[in-house]
């Protein structure tokens, strides 16, 4: 039977069954948004920085081919091995092969949304290799057997009490202890063991500098560094769009990234990886997985400017009230909703509609991606491709007929209002989603057009 | 100055008093206002649902009715934004362009074109402004909380001219109310939750009335307020700016 997932609206409906929890989720993320605002306002040149970042990325996307080759040349000269993966399957295969060459059965991985996108962990599990995620939030959702619900704050949907329970079950902490400090210390002990034993470490990449062939990985926990420095083999997985032209451009992005993501001036660790140390191997996997296709779609090209800060999620009033898992995609929220249909238009046809198009996402975006405008454009594409529900399509066609003919519109309006006044049960019933938690507007006897005719002409 | 009055479909059908207040206000301020009979809808409900290709009927009607005015004014930021961004008619692009460049949401028309500095209006109540997203972020009628930029608000500028009116401060100045066109029915749960939260911010800060530039958002908030049996009422900004002594 064909797999059919639940769509955003249904998943969000379930999430909303527990209103106090929705309030908590909303407040937690709003708190991050406010921290971001304070940090943005602390820089008078904030808007100029955004503009600069957007233009640098514009240049990158216009010259991606050249920058990628420049990066590869310099990375190879530095002693790294560069692999090219056309899609998720190829990426996973390359990583598996490297792991098999080392004969490892267990390894550490720091945060990488790309490997989430490629579903690397389950793939490796199928081949008998266990991945230990070392970002604390990621480790928590991994123990809970859940995907991350946010790209920067992967377990933002979990309360500390729930984390205490998970740690009790998996790490042997005392039952009922939900003290964040205590739990963090327990996680640190547990992860230390993994770091020391692991011979291979996978990291993501935040920025890859074409000019030098180096990569920058930003973390607050230093876990990428611990993994990469202790292991014999460092595998860095990156999407093609992570390239920036020169080292000097890093200043623009590092200032924007942490402020937008968590409201910090800079991440605790912004680590540069350039050459493998003596005896170590450094592998870089450059992954396309639909990116060049998106680059070819002019309307959606800007989505590749994304630096994965998550600011659009924190500000999104829909995300805050529907939770990351309702997006049923590795990358949730507004940015995920414009990236996902590129990966699979049918599977993610619902996501561009999971927005009020309020535009807050575009305003917080540090690289000025026109997110809400792309959501609008995806709706048109998805509809034309036939991925919109039949009922909706029929309704829209009927609406078009009525609204295109003034006489019909006037008659339909008059009849409609008369029915609503005379037989309110026709609209005030369980079939009407508006009526479930809202009253209908009171239908007046005269429309404005009727009034105007009587009073002005 | 010949002003074409654009009254969006749901205002025409459900909130004629908003159309009347808009017309009366513009006339009081000396405009020659004409409401072209036969106008229907800007087409936004279809376009935002992914059916922009079905809006040519609406677009043609819009150009038919509004091509000859110096200005086109409507009491809805959302519908005005839709026209500004998406009105195109094959073979009549010059007329469509004229309209896109000459269409204004009511409050921006009052502040930017008429440059209103005084109003004879009195409304002695505590009022919260709901900054509707399309007007605010789309048309730029007020500063947006996400941007590092100087504060301004055209609706607030106007409401400050109303005698006795006290504006309430909100915790979240410009959060979306969750209406979002067909989003309000297809994403009912999130839509209502957003509306409830928006209302709570106004109520917690002592608002007796919630006003705004978009009846669509207000209709959604009103629906929830009525279900909650709240005493808080919604009024379109035109109704307050046009309010006589009471």
Image: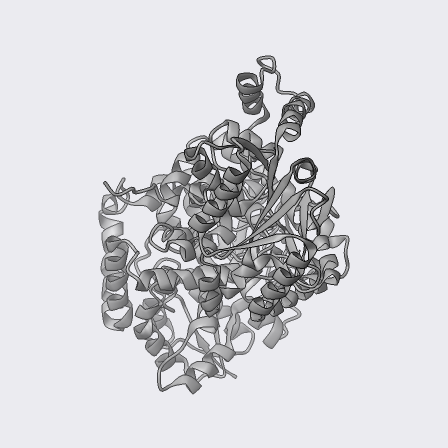
Find residue A286 and report its horizontal and vertical position in percent.
54, 55
Q: In the rendering, at what x and y percent does residue A392 appear?
A: 28, 55
Choose between A220 and A276: the one closer to the eye.
Answer: A276
Residue A409, above or below B197? below
Position of the N terminus of chain A, as image quadrant, is top left
In the figure, is residue A46 to the left or right of B116?
right
| Above or below, comparing residue A296 to residue A27 in the picture | below
Above or below — where is A282 with respect to A18? below
Q: Quadrant of residue A262?
A: top right
- Relative horizontal placement of residue A457, taking residue B132 as reference (left or right): left
Residue A318 on image: x %, y % = 49, 46
Residue at figure coordinates x 27%, y 40% from the top left: A430
Q: Nearer the viewer, residue A264 or B224?
A: A264
Q: Quadrant of the C terminus of chain A?
A: bottom left
Residue at image coords 60%, 62%: A368
Relative depth, front residue between B93 and A69:
A69
- Residue located 45% across and 46% down the image: A93
């Amino acid at each position: 039977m064909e797999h059919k997932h639940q769509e955003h609206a249904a998943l969000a409906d379930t999430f909303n069954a527990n209103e106090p929890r929705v309030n908590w989720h909303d407040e937690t993320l709003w708190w991050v948004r406010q921290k971001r605002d304070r940090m943005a306002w602390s820089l008078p040149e904030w808007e100029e920085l955004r503009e600069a970042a957007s233009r640098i990325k514009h240049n990158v996307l216009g010259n991606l081919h050249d920058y990628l080759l420049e990066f590869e040349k310099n990375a190879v000269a530095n002693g790294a091995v560069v692999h090219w993966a056309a899609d998720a399957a190829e990426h996973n295969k390359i990583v598996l092969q490297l792991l098999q060459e080392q004969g490892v059965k267990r390894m550490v991985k720091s945060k990488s949304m790309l490997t989430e996108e490629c579903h690397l962990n389950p793939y490796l599990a199928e081949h008998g290799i266990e991945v230990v995620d070392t970002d604390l939030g990621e480790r928590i959702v991994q123990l809970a057997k859940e995907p991350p619900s946010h790209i920067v704050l992967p377990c933002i949907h979990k309360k500390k009490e729930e984390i205490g329970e998970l740690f009790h079950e998996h790490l042997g902490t005392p039952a009922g202890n939900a003290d964040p400090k205590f739990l963090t210390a327990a996680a640190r002990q547990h992860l230390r063991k993994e770091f020391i034993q692991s011979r291979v470490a996978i990291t993501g990449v935040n920025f890859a500098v074409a000019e030098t062939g180096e990569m920058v990985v930003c973390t607050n926990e230093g876990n990428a560094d611990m993994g990469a420095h202790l292991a014999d083999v460092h595998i860095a997985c990156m999407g093609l769009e992570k390239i920036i032209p020169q080292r000097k451009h890093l200043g623009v992005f590092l200032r924007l990234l942490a402020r937008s993501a968590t409201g910090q001036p800079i991440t605790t660790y912004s680590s540069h990886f350039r050459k493998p140390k003596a005896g170590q191997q450094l592998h870089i996997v450059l992954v396309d997985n639909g990116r060049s296709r998106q680059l070819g779609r002019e309307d959606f090209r800007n989505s590749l400017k994304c630096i994965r800060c998550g600011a659009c999620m924190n500000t999104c009033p829909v995300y805050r009230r529907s939770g990351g898992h309702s997006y049923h995609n590795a990358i949730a929220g507004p940015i995920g909703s414009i990236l996902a249909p590129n990966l699979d238009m049918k599977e993610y046809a619902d996501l561009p509609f999971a927005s009020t198009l309020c535009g807050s996402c575009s305003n917080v975006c540090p690289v000025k991606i026109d997110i809400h405008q792309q959501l609008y454009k995806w709706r048109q594409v998805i509809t034309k491709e036939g991925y919109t529900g039949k009922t909706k399509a029929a309704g829209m066609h009927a609406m078009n007929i009525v609204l295109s003919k003034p006489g019909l519109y006037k008659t339909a309006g008059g009849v409609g209002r008369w029915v609503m006044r005379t037989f309110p049960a026709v609209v005030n019933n369980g079939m009407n989603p508006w009526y479930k938690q809202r009253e209908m507007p009171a239908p007046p006897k005269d429309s404005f057009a009727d009034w105007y005719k009587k009073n002005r002409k | 100055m010949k002003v074409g009055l654009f009254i969006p479909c749901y205002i025409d059908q459900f909130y004629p008093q908003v159309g009347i207040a808009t017309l009366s206000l513009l006339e009081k301020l000396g405009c020659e206002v004409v409401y072209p009979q036969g106008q229907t809808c800007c087409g936004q409900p279809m376009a935002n649902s992914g059916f922009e290709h079905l809006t040519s009927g609406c677009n043609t009607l819009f150009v038919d009715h509004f091509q000859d005015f110096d200005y086109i004014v409507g009491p809805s930021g959302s519908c005005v934004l839709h026209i500004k961004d998406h009105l195109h008619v094959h073979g009549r692009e010059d007329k469509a362009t004229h309209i896109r460049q000459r269409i204004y949401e009511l409050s921006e028309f009052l502040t930017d074109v008429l440059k209103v500095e005084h109003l004879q209006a009195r409304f002695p109540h505590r009022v919260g402004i709901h900054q509707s997203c399309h007007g605010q972020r789309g048309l730029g009628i007020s500063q947006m909380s996400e941007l590092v930029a100087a504060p301004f608000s055209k609706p607030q500028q106007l409401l400050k001219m109303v005698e006795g009116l006290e504006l309430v401060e909100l915790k979240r100045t410009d959060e979306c109310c969750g209406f979002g066109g067909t989003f309000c029915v297809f994403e009912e749960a999130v839509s209502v939750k957003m509306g409830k939260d928006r209302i709570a911010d106004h109520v917690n800060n002592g608002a007796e009335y919630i006003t705004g530039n978009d009846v669509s958002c207000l209709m959604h908030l009103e629906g929830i307020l009525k279900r909650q049996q709240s005493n808080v009422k919604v009024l379109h900004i035109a109704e307050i700016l046009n309010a006589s002594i009471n």
